[in-house]
């Protein structure tokens, strides 16, 4: 039988991909790729140019990624034991290939020759930038190390990738394993009906009576925010915040604490091997902040400017709780519950009141409409091969009906799907040697609550999440750069990549755009103006406290990767305690709260020593959005400037230069605090 992953396809043949075809597709493709690279090197010895060398290597790389991408994606959205076993094998194969490639001195020397001959070869700016980035990646991958040190590098990288994969698996498995069966519905008082219905379905699926609480994010958040049963809130909070740890509710096999220590130790050794003092120092080479001191200065400045307001927010909340409920000692599992009560007291609104106004089809239609008004983009749904019946696919065109790219939307929670929300690359834009243009394609993945009677409703936080991931997808598919390693979100500095996604979130807080994305699922009317006004006001609720939490995570990440010492005991808990002393919180975290054990971004993903990127990029997003607010929310002229000067240019130029071209001036770093409603 022909392997569907090895056949020429415009889009991945998800309906034909089986577990049996995955490993062989990767093995065959990598073997062929290695042979072709050797042929390219031998054929063009000392006569390398863009067309006979750089372009051909890029095409081989993109072909391999297009085969790996659907496998990688299925591991996240259709996870099971078979896929997981295949994925672990494939990750090892891909890792070995990447090391073979990045430590191939013949390849490196060939790129150096092309770079040195850039004037003779008449290379353009984009080609020079592509080659420069490739050479930098070679050098960060140990190409200049001795043979002995290369072997050490190989072991470190291989072990790190295994550990990160194990970390993610442990989070997934511990989340799946922990559940609580409730027989008495009265114990669920206060929880929204749509969540209670999900619990009931969960129980039926597992042939249990009553209601089955799982630790999927929508269920956890609903309980901790709305459930009147304090004992249940405490129990679920405990279960959720001890996932992937050594605490009694978990299997010791799923404990991520040893993995974290091993990862930190290996990252430290890796950075030393490459000539850096710490992993943070190494990581910032590929970020716009560049220096650790600059990141720390930025974060401590945010604390200084927001601390007074955060203290006031805590005081106001505690006064409310004491007056209304006669409670002084607020426990961690009470914080979200009473915060929601105070929010309702101030604004008369919570997400469950406005869910009825955000059916998913109206939100999507309005989101596309907003994008059309700003950028002139047109979205057309198309039926293609997908991995789940609820997945939708859209082609995206410019105002002249010319295809930009495409987006898959997989928006609903499933037991076999990893938690959270993320955007990923299916394929990148590339103009091939044969003249064929491959258009970019993106995946947008969320975990929204499933439908009740086939009605899919979102709360406002879920609307924000959708716009955020959609912003990433737009950044990738609107690219006009034909070289894949600098096209779309490829090569974008990590502390810049969140800029377009956070920028899109701001549209969910404006009167005009809220009218476009809302409609009551039964009455068919928009959100009443009084509710819109309350919603917009509520944006600034506990803004400084929310910022404090992000700063805490960012500081922990950058500092643990800068200060880690294998000889020190309890370094993680001691560092968290030290950081929190300088921050403002409503309630101290209990010693058993193991949020680091599920911190996927830094221990299971690409954000190690880079979690600060969300706040760093938010400066750009806030300042950009002010440009629209000052000159007309749906101003197509400014939209065109943003599209042409930033979104469509990938990593072809320094982001600070691109931002200045768009904004017409340097960044106003105070925009972040102003947009959040923090007085400075």
Image: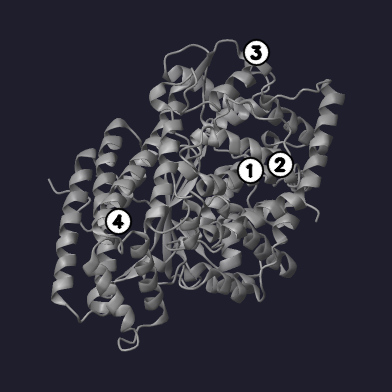
Which quadrant of the figure has residue 328? top right
What colour scheme governs how the chains and residues are painted in the rendered image of this protein? one colour
Which residue is denoted by mark 1 in the rendering? Answer: 552
Query: Which residue shows up at 60% across the image and 66% down it?
Result: 374
Q: Nearer the viewer, mark 4 or mark 1?
A: 1
- Mark 2: few/some/many CA within 10 Å (<14, 14-19, 20+): some
In percent of width and height, residue 289 lies at: 57, 62
Mark nearer the N terminus (3 vs 1):
3
In percent of width and height, residue 2 lies at: 14, 49
Which quadrant: the C terminus? bottom right
Mark nearer the N terminus (2 vs 3):
3
As drawn, the label of residue 66 is: 4
Q: CB under 8 Å between callouts 2 and 1?
A: yes
* Count of marks, rendered view: 4
Q: Nearer the viewer, residue 200 or 64?
A: 64
Which residue is denoted by mark 2 in the rendering? Answer: 583
Horizontal side of residue 573 vs 11, given as left or right: right
Q: Nearer the viewer, residue 405 or 601?
A: 601
Query: Which residue shows up at 34% across the image and 40% down it?
Result: 75
Point out the residue furthest to the front here: 567
Q: CA distance from mark 2 to mark 3?
A: 38 Å
**Is 670 above or below relative to 151?**
below
Q: Nearer the viewer, residue 48 or 339?
A: 48
Q: CB under 8 Å between callouts 4 and 3?
A: no
Mark nearer the N terminus (2 vs 1):
1
Q: Residue 415, can we see it?
A: no
Which quadrant: the N terminus? top left
As drawn, the label of residue 186 is: 3
Q: Nearer the viewer, mark 4 or mark 3?
A: 4
Q: CA distance from mark 4 to mark 1?
A: 37 Å
């Amino acid at each position: 039988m022909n392997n569907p992953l090895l056949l020429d396809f415009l889009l991945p043949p998800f309906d034909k991909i089986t577990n049996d075809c995955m490993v062989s597709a990767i093995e065959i493709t990598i073997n062929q790729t290695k042979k072709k690279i050797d042929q390219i090197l031998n054929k063009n010895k000392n006569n390398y140019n863009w067309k006979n060398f750089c372009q051909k290597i890029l095409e081989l790389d993109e072909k391999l990624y297009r085969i790996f991408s659907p496998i990688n994606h299925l591991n996240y959205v259709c996870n099971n034991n078979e896929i997981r076993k295949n994925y672990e094998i494939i990750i090892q194969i891909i890792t070995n290939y990447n090391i073979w490639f990045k430590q191939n001195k013949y390849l490196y020397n060939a790129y150096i020759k092309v770079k040195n001959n850039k004037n003779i070869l008449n290379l353009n700016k984009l080609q020079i930038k592509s080659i420069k980035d490739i050479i930098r990646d070679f050098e960060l991958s140990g190409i200049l190390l001795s043979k002995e040190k290369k072997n050490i590098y190989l072991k470190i990288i291989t072990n790190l990738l295994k550990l990160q994969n194990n970390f993610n698996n442990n989070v997934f498995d511990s989340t799946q394993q922990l559940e609580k069966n409730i027989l008495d519905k009265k114990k669920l008082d206060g929880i929204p009906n749509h969540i209670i219905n999900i619990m009931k379905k969960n129980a039926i699926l597992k042939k249990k009576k009553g209601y089955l609480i799982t630790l999927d994010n929508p269920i956890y958040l609903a309980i901790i925010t709305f459930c009147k049963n304090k004992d249940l809130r405490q129990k679920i909070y405990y279960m959720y915040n001890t996932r992937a740890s050594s605490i009694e509710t978990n299997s010791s096999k799923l404990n991520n604490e040893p993995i974290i220590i091993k990862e930190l130790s290996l990252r430290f050794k890796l950075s030393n091997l490459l000539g850096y003092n710490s992993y943070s120092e190494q990581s910032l080479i590929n970020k716009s902040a560049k220096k650790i001191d600059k990141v720390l200065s930025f974060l401590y400045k945010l604390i200084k400017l927001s601390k007074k307001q955060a203290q006031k927010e805590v005081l106001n909340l505690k006064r409310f709780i004491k007056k209304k409920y006669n409670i002084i000692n607020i426990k961690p599992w009470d914080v979200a519950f009473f915060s929601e009560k105070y929010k309702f007291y101030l604004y008369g609104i919570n997400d469950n009141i406005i869910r009825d106004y955000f059916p998913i089809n109206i939100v999507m239609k309005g989101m596309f409409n907003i994008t059309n008004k700003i950028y002139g983009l047109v979205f057309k749904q198309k039926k293609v091969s997908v991995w789940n019946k609820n997945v939708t696919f859209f082609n995206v065109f410019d105002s002249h009906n010319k295809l930009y790219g495409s987006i898959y939307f997989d928006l609903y929670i499933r037991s076999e799907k990893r938690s959270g929300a993320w955007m990923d690359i299916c394929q990148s834009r590339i103009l091939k040697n044969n003249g064929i243009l491959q258009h970019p394609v993106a995946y947008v993945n969320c975990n929204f609550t499933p439908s009740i009677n086939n009605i899919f409703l979102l709360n406002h936080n879920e609307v924000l999440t959708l716009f955020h991931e959609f912003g990433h997808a737009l950044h990738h598919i609107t690219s006009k750069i034909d070289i894949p390693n600098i096209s779309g979100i490829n090569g974008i500095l990590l502390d810049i990549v969140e800029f377009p996604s956070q920028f899109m979130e701001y549209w969910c807080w404006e009167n005009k755009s809220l009218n476009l994305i809302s409609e009551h699922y039964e009455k068919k009317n928009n959100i009443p103006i009084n509710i819109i006004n309350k919603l917009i006001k509520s944006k600034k609720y506990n803004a400084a406290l929310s910022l404090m939490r992000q700063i805490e995570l960012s500081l922990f990440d950058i500092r643990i990767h800068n200060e880690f010492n294998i000889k020190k005991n309890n370094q993680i808990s001691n560092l968290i305690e030290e950081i929190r002393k300088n921050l403002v919180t409503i309630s101290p975290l209990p010693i058993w709260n193991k949020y680091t054990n599920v911190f996927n971004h830094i221990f299971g993903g690409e954000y190690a020593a880079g979690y600060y990127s969300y706040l760093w990029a938010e400066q750009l997003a806030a300042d950009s959005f002010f440009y629209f607010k000052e000159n007309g929310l749906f101003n197509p002229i400014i939209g065109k400037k943003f599209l042409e000067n930033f979104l469509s240019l990938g990593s072809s130029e320094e982001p600070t230069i691109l931002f200045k071209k768009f904004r017409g001036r340097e960044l106003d770093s105070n925009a972040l605090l102003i947009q959040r409603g923090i007085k400075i």
